[in-house]
Image: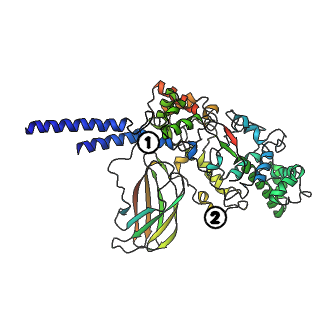
Amino acid sequence: MKVILKAVLSAAIAVSTLIAAAASAVPWGGADGWSKQEISILASLRLSQLEPPPRDYSNRYESDPRAAELGKRIFFDKRFSSNGAVSCASCHDPKQQFQDGRPLGLGVATGTRRTMPVAGAGYSPFLFWDGRKDSVWSQALGPLEDPAEHGGNRLAFAHILRAHYQSAYESVFGPLPDLARLPREASPIGNDRQRALWAGMGAADRDAVSRVFANMGKAIAAYEKTLQHGESRLDRYLEAVVKRDAGSYQELTPSEKNGLRVFIGKGQCVTCHNGPLLTDQHFHNTGIPQLSDAKRDLGRRAGIAKVAKDEFNCLGPFSDAGEEHCAELRFLAGEDHSLDAAFKTPGLRNVAARAPYMHAGQKRTLAEVIEHYRNAPAAKVGHSELSKIALSDQEARDLAEFLRSLDGPVQERSAGR
Amino acid sequence: MLRRKILGLICLLAFAFLAGCMSPPTGLDLSSRRPTEQRLYVVEVRSLANPIAVNKMHSWEAKVTLPTGEPVTGARIAVGGGMPQHGHGYPTQPRVTKELGEGRYLIEGMKFSMTGWWELKLDIASSAGADKVTFNTVIGQQ
C-alpha cells in the first residue's frame, strides 16, 4: 500500500512538474503565443506608453507657437550658412524622417558623423552620438558654427535675423541688439579672422550676440519639439496583444513575430533598445569599427568633457533653468572607461528606412548590423559590451523583417503642451 | 520542495531568456542594511523613489551608524558601483549632496539605465575610520 502511495505521489509530482514547466514556457493567460512575462515587455514598447517629453527648463520658449514658427522658418533657410546653400533641412530632410541616408553628413563639407533623425530628440538628456550637448536648443547651435556643416558664425547669423526676421524674432525674444557698429562676422570658435574680430568686440556686445544665437537655437528647438512619431504596424500589433484583440494579430507576419521574439529574447536587443522609442538614451561601446585608425573617436568619453564646458549648457548664462533643473549636468558621469568609444543608443522607430547605420554609417544594412551583433567582434578602442549571440540564419532574417514593422510617420503636431 | 525548486529554476531561466541579460546570480544578498567590510559601520540605504523607474534621475538616502547604533555625522562618503555583469558603471555620477541629520545622508544623481543587477558601493570615512560596503539591488522589468 505504502509502495503504491509513494509511486502515485512520485507520479503526481512528476506530472505537476511537467505541467508547471509547460505553464512557464507556454502562455496560459497569454495571447498569440506570448507568455504573460513576454507581454509585459511587449506592452512597454507601445507608442501609447510614450509620456510627453520632459520639460526643458533651460528653454523657456520651447512650447511657444511663435517661437516654433520662427524656428521652422530658420530650419529651412539656407542663408544661415557660409555658402548660402546649407540649411538644417539639408541634412535633416523631412522627406527622409529628418535625416539624409548618408554615412556622413554633407554640409559645406563632409562631416565626421552620421546625421541623426530629429523626432523624439527631446527625450534624451544628451544630444549627438557622443552626448556633447545637453539640450535640444544647444544642439542646434553645434552644426550652425561647425566648419564642415553650416560653416557659419553667430554674428553673421544675427545680421541675417535682423535683415529678414526682425519682427518675428522680436515678437518672441524682445529687441535685437544694435548690430550696425559690429563687424559682418565674428565668433569665439570661428576661423582666425572671426576669432580675432570676436576678441575685438566689447563684452556686452559679445554677450548680446551670443544671446541672439542661443535664442535661434531655442526657436529651432521649439519647432523640433512639434515633430513626433506616429503609430507603426508594430504598435497596432502590440496593442492587439495587450488587449487580447485576436482580430488584429495578423498585423505582423509569422516571420516578424519570430523576429520580435528574438528581439526581446536571445537577441538581447531590448536590453538597450527598450521603451516606446526603443532606446535607453544611454551610451554603449558595441565594438563598432573606428572610421579612421589615425583619429580615434572616443565617443561619450570625449562628449562628457565637451558638455561640461559648453557655454550653452544647462548651468550656463544663456540657460533659463535654475540649478535644481540641471541634475543631468550636475551629476554628469565621470571618467569611466566603459564610456571610451561609447555611442548613443539610437531609437529604432523607422530604422529600416534609415540605412546606413552606426555613428559614421559603418554598417550598410540591417543584415550587417545583425551580423555584427552575432559575431560581437572585440573593440579596437575601449571595451565592447557585446558577447556573441547564437542566432540561426533564419532568426537573423526574421529579426531584420521584424525591424521593418517599426516604420511609421513623423508628424508635425501643433506647438504647446 | 523539489517542484518549487524546478519551477524556480524554470522561472530564472525564463527571466534570463526574456531579459536578454544574464540573470542575477543566485543567493544574492539583497538586504538594504549591512555592516561595512571591516565592521566599522552599519549602513542602511533606501531609494526615495518608489517604484524605481529605469532612466529616471532620483535620490537615495544612506543612514550610517556605528555598530552600537550611534549615528555617524560628518562622514565623507564616495558613491560608486554599476552592473558587474555588463562591466559598466552608473550612467551618472551620484554623490552625497547633504547631511540630513541623525547620520542620514542624501545621495543625489542616482539613475539606473536598465533593468538587472546593480551594485551600490559606498566608501565611508569619518573619525571612526575608513571602510566600505556594497549593496545589491535588482531593478525589475517596468
Residue A373 is left or right of residue A61, and the answer is left
Residue A51 at x, y percent in the picture: 59, 50
Q: Say whether residue A218 is left or right of residue B105.
A: right
**Observer-nearest of A113 and B69:** B69
Q: Is residue A71 left or right of residue B47?
A: right
Q: Amino acid at mark 1?
A: Ala
Residue B19 badge: 1
Of all chains, the one bearing label 1 is B
Task: Please name the residue shown 83% across and 57% down the image.
Answer: A171
Q: Is residue A285 above or below residue B80?
A: above
Tag 2 residue: A323
Label 2 Cα crowd, 10 Å radius (few <14 / some 14-19 / many 20+): some
Is label 2 in a helix, a strand or a loop?
Answer: helix
Q: Residue furthest right?
A: A180
Around disc 1, counting alpha carbons within 10 Å, would you say few (fewer than 14), some (14 to 19), or many (20 or more)? Answer: many
- Chain label for disc 2: A
